[in-house]
Amino acid sequence: MNLNPDNCYQALLTHDRRFDGVFFVGVKTTGIYCRTVCPAKTPNFKSCTFYNNAALAERAGFRPCLRCRPELAPGNGIMDSVPRLAAIAANRIEDGALTTGTLEELAGDMGISSRHLRRVVEKEFGVTPIELAQTQRLLYAKRLLTDSKLVITEIAFASGFASVRRFNALFKERYDLNPTDIRRAKTDKKLALLNCDINFTPPFDWNRVSSFLRVRSIPGVESFQNNSYLRTASFGKHHGWLQVTPSFATGFETESGSSSDEHSLRLTVSESLTPVLPRVVARVKRLFDTYADPNAINGSLADLAMKHPGLRLVGAFDGFEMAIRAILGQQVSVAAATTIAGRVAARFGSAIETPYAELTLLTSEARSIADANVTDITALGITTARAETILILSQAVADGKISLEPGADVERTVKDLTDLKGIGEWTAQYIAMRALSWPDAYPHGDLGLKKALGVTSSKEVLAAGEKWRPWRGYAVMHLWESLAD
């Protein structure tokens, strides 16, 4: 993305939220970099330099602002300003791909060579994948230093650093601060939970997004309490629960005493999940589609998006969980599929204690179902054919033959899914839309789409969708919503 300094400065002067996360401003007189919405006094034009992303600003020697906190900026800049491969790589890196694995493994999962991945990332972001990962780790560490009571050793490892020594050295090198300097600046209040805000670009239609999730919530695993979304979560040995509440319903304040951003979701996690906070945040962002820039998307959808401009492409917290839910939903009502999904979780998931009576189960993992047999599954009220499909998919995911996380090659994954017995184009496209967060997924055989468009054939649905590329997934959400209006 080519940044015009004059235009960037005008956006900075007006604190235009549409540019929040699209670029960052480095202030030469202070040595810090900020978001366009920073509440600090706007610097003179001559003192400003502009960068496409936080990693570039840090490479230039700037450290993140402690007031506007660049780590909280929405991710629409990455998603809308670079080619698909670079965007996917950036999101996978944010999700900890280079913490839990290697660059070669990430590239292989994306279906490209590590050399090509390096070239794509450097071309689009101006930094290497490792530098991008380091910036992400440091920003998450800064968030944990500010918002949690974890000791610095725990923060270093939770942020993906192999040693405390390396963490301290890089923190000092990048920010000219020691981690203890950030910790001293926070209050002495002991936190029983960790709260953090996830910003988004408005508009955001929480009521419709939450309604979509509410009727599909898996009993025991997910629930809604007033305006809050609740669920359990498991990351290896770390198990716990989380709550997501829109800013208009929180009434919370940040650790610094300032009010939560009015365009944000308040994420609360149990202490048991703080060591894996980066992964939790990334999954919540995908679930609620906070990366999106609805203004740009709605411009392409035109009249279709006018009635509900804040509608999002609802994703998935757990790709495998969502895929099983999609198979259960084949040719049955949403309510019936939800009931059966609860039985699957009760049979193949694990028990967990939480402060909420509604949250009692950790979701089923692929291996636990893969080790079962068809009879175990049909005993839950599932047809033999569908049970066989669930078993085949579970074995493919457990064996690493199919990845159901964003960043997987979409075309290849859709083909691999449709090659499995019992998974057709509709199911594969629906999984791509939600589990893979693919914005152009289009389950054109859907009966609801035919009804909303007033056509009778899948071919006509396909033809109608051409004008909405590359946002056909969002078009699907709007067409489904039109049936409820």
Image (tube, helix red, strand yellow):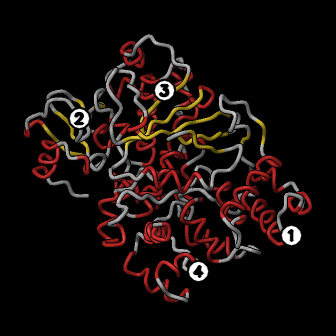
Q: Secondary structure at mark 1?
A: helix
Mark 4 lies on residue: 445
Query: Which sits earlier in the primary sequence, circle 3 or circle 2?
Result: 2
Can the viewer see residue 135 in this picture? no
Left or right: 276 in relation to 128: right
Q: Nearer the viewer, mark 4 or mark 3?
A: 4
Q: Residue at x 74, y 51 (%)?
A: 342
Cβ–Cβ under 8 Å for marks 4 and 3: no
Image quadrant holding the N terminus, namely bottom left
- Which residue type does callout 3 highlight? Arg
Can the viewer see residue 354 in this picture? yes
Query: Which sits earlier in the primary sequence, circle 4 or circle 3?
Result: 3
Q: Disc 1 and disc 2: Cα gap in Å? A: 57 Å
Mark 1 lies on residue: 384
Q: For residue 38, which numbered disc appears in the image? A: 2
Query: Which sits earlier in the primary sequence, circle 3 or circle 1?
Result: 3
Cβ–Cβ under 8 Å for marks 4 and 1: no
Left or right: 34 in relation to 43: right
Q: Residue at x 27, y 33 (%)?
A: 61
Q: Residues within 10 Å of mark 3 (few under 14, many from 20)?
A: few
Q: Residues within 10 Å of mark 1 (few under 14, many from 20)?
A: some
Image x and y of residue 157, in percent: 56, 28
Q: Residue at x 64, y 71 (%)?
A: 427
Q: Disc 2 and disc 4: Cα gap in Å? A: 46 Å
Q: Disc 4 and disc 1: Cα gap in Å? A: 24 Å
Image x and y of residue 320, in percent: 67, 56
Vertical relation: 64 (above or below) 447: above
Query: Which sits earlier in the primary sequence, circle 2 or circle 4?
Result: 2
Mark 3 lies on residue: 166
Q: Residues within 10 Å of mark 4 (few under 14, many from 20)?
A: many
